[in-house]
C-alpha cells in the first residue's frame, strides 16, 4: 500500500509540474499556468517575475495524487486477477 502511495505521490507531483509548462489562460495581461487550478502566474511584460500560488500548487498535487492513486489501485487489481 505504501509503495502505491509513493508512486501516486510522485505521479501527482510530476503531473502538477508538467502542467506548469503550458499556458492555460491569458487574463488581463497575465500568463497563468497549472491545471486544474492556476498555480503559476506572470504579468506579461519584459523582466516580470513568476508568482507561485502555494495553496493552489498543493491542491493540484493533492488532486493529481488522488487520481493517480485510484488508477494505480485499478491497475494493480487488474494485474493480480
Image: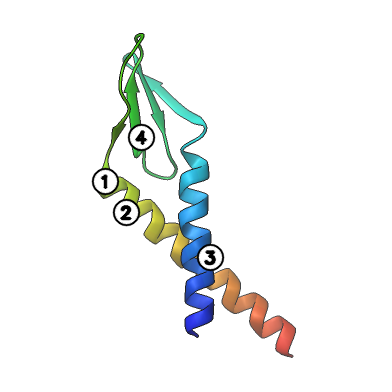
| Earlier sequence position, callout 3 versus callout 2 | 2
At x 65%, y 81%, the residue is 76
Cα gap from disc 2 to disc 4, whole angstroms: 12 Å
| Earlier sequence position, callout 4 versus callout 3 | 4
Q: Residues within 10 Å of mark 4 (few under 14, many from 20)?
A: many
Cα gap from disc 2 to disc 1, whole angstroms: 6 Å
Q: Which label sits in the foreground, 1 or 3?
A: 1
Q: In the rendered view, does 75 fall on the left or right side of 22?
A: right
For label 2, the residue is 58
- Residue 77, compared with residue 34, is above or below; it is below
Q: Give the image's coloring scheme.
A: rainbow
At x 53%, y 77%, the residue is 4
Q: In the rendered view, does 68 fall on the left or right side of 30?
A: right
Q: Farthest top residue? A: 46
Q: Farthest front residue? A: 47
| Residue 66 screen position, x and y as percent | 45, 66
Check disc 1 and report its element: helix, strand or loop: helix
Dot label at residue 36: none
- Residue 44, compared with residue 67, is above or below; it is above
| Earlier sequence position, callout 1 versus callout 3 | 1
Cα gap from disc 4 to disc 3, whole angstroms: 22 Å
For label 1, the residue is 54
Check disc 2 and report its element: helix, strand or loop: helix
Quarter-of-image position of residue 59: bottom left
For label 3, the residue is 68
For label 4, the residue is 40
Cα gap from disc 1 to disc 3, whole angstroms: 21 Å
Amino acid at each position: 500500500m505504501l509503495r502505491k502511495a509513493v508512486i501516486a505521490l510522485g505521479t501527482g507531483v510530476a503531473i502538477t509540474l508538467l502542467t506548469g509548462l503550458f499556458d492555460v489562460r491569458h487574463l488581463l495581461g497575465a500568463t497563468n499556468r497549472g491545471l486544474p487550478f492556476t498555480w503559476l502566474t506572470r504579468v506579461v511584460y519584459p523582466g516580470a517575475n513568476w508568482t507561485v500560488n502555494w495553496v493552489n500548487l498543493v491542491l493540484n498535487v493533492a488532486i493529481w495524487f488522488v487520481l493517480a492513486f485510484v488508477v494505480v489501485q485499478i491497475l494493480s487489481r487488474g494485474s493480480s486477477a
